[in-house]
Image (spheres, helix red, strand yellow):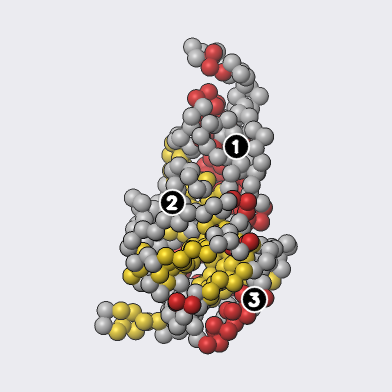
Amino acid sequence: EAFEHSAQVTTLSVHHAGRGFYPPSGGTCIEGKGRGLGHSANVALGRGASDATFERAFAGAAEAVARRERRLGGDDVAVVVQCGSDGLGGDPVGAFNLTGDAYVACVRRVVAWGWPVLVLGGGGYARSDCARCWARVTAAVCGVEIAADADVPEHEFLAEYALGFYMATAASAAADENTVQAVQALVETVEAAMEAAVRRRAGDDADAETQTVGRKKVATGRRPAWLDGLAQRTGSESADSADSSEQLGDRPRTLVQSERHAVALVGGMPAEASALVAQAQADGRSVAGGSSAQHAFVATAGECIVWAYGGVAQRLQLAHNAGMAAPVVVLVRAAGGAAGVLACGGGRLRYWADVQQGGRFVEADAGVRGDMVVRGVQVQTHG
């Protein structure tokens, strides 16, 4: 938050985010405000992230940030790396399943960029594993390798390493809840945002040509230049096409564009969603779209369609919002791979529990001004 309004500092956080997990670092989204828009990126991984998962996510997202900095000049860049070792498999608090090898690989990648680097520690609640990990990271920064099977040197605290006098930190048997496809989707979100930030800096990326009416800027309809790059990444010939998708390996891409937003969805778009978008665009109505690690949605003023990748789509009615702008929709992860949906618009907040199985519908007046909830709503679900 200290830098959310700054275009001079870019923050990239690869972390776990989940219900009840502290600290609540946020789901995957590109944040920042004002001039800092696009300069803060969260890459939120699921539980049990392995070395391979973490390195794949970090390499893709971090390299996207580095490419952006080089294109913007890159002469006065310095990098701060914060290595919280609570991601180690033996940590009693963290949710990942990493070993020291992942930390070393990521820090070496950053050092190889050639910019000045400051490496910091962070969280970590298994003291001996913290020491092992940070010793190996420090050595990597200095160009020295400490092998995982090297002995812990004798010193006054040697007894704390009694479970294994080696520099290795062990992974647990926890399952990795992250798929290759989901990680790739997170990386591509960051890549698209970094590309957009470059275009904004170059002055080539206006959201649309605008005219001033009073104190409000109104879009006149020209497609933003940054959409061209996003359209190419999705394989679509036209970013205005509602069903412009292409099979890339086993991960089809679909680009959903409305007047003010564009979202690249992973996993393709079911026929119901494509039809909804096409009809809305033909009628000149606004469309919202978005995706999480496991689900995606498209929404117009009157209805929202939610689906799990490779799963069945479910249509949710928003009759109270008919004739208004597309609502703000938030996907809420639930147990068992299900999803809940919060839709805010038309002066109300609506909630669906377990949309995959048609769970009970809950609705409450929330005291909404535009898209801002001004009075809290508590929703309890069972099962």
Task: Give the residue at x 46% y 35%.
Answer: 123
> Can residue 114 be seen by looking at this rendering?
no
Instruction: Judge by depth and name the residue closer to the eye, 182 or 131.
Output: 182
Instruction: Judge by depth and name the residue closer to the eye, 171 or 319.
Output: 319
376 w.r.t. 325: above or below: above
In this rendering, the label closer to the viewer, 1 or 3: 3
Tell me the amino acid under the disc marked 2: Thr
Residue denoted by label 1 = 98
Mark 2 or mark 3: whose residue is earlier in sequence: 2
How many numbered badges does the structure rendering display?
Answer: 3
Instruction: Judge by depth and name the residue closer to the eye, 169 or 377.
Output: 377
> Can residue 207 be seen by looking at this rendering?
yes
Q: Are marks 1 and 3 in contact (CB under 8 Å)?
A: no
Tell me the amino acid under the disc marked 1: Leu
Mark 1 or mark 3: whose residue is earlier in sequence: 1
Residue 261 at x, y percent in the picture: 48, 73
Residue denoted by label 3 = 272
* Image quadrant where residue 379 sits: bottom left
Tag 1's secondary structure? loop
Q: Residues within 10 Å of mark 1 (few under 14, many from 20)?
A: many
Residue denoted by label 2 = 11
Furthest toward the right, the residue is: 249
In this rendering, the label closer to the viewer, 2 or 3: 3
Tell me the amino acid under the disc marked 3: Glu
Q: Are marks 2 and 3 in contact (CB under 8 Å)?
A: no
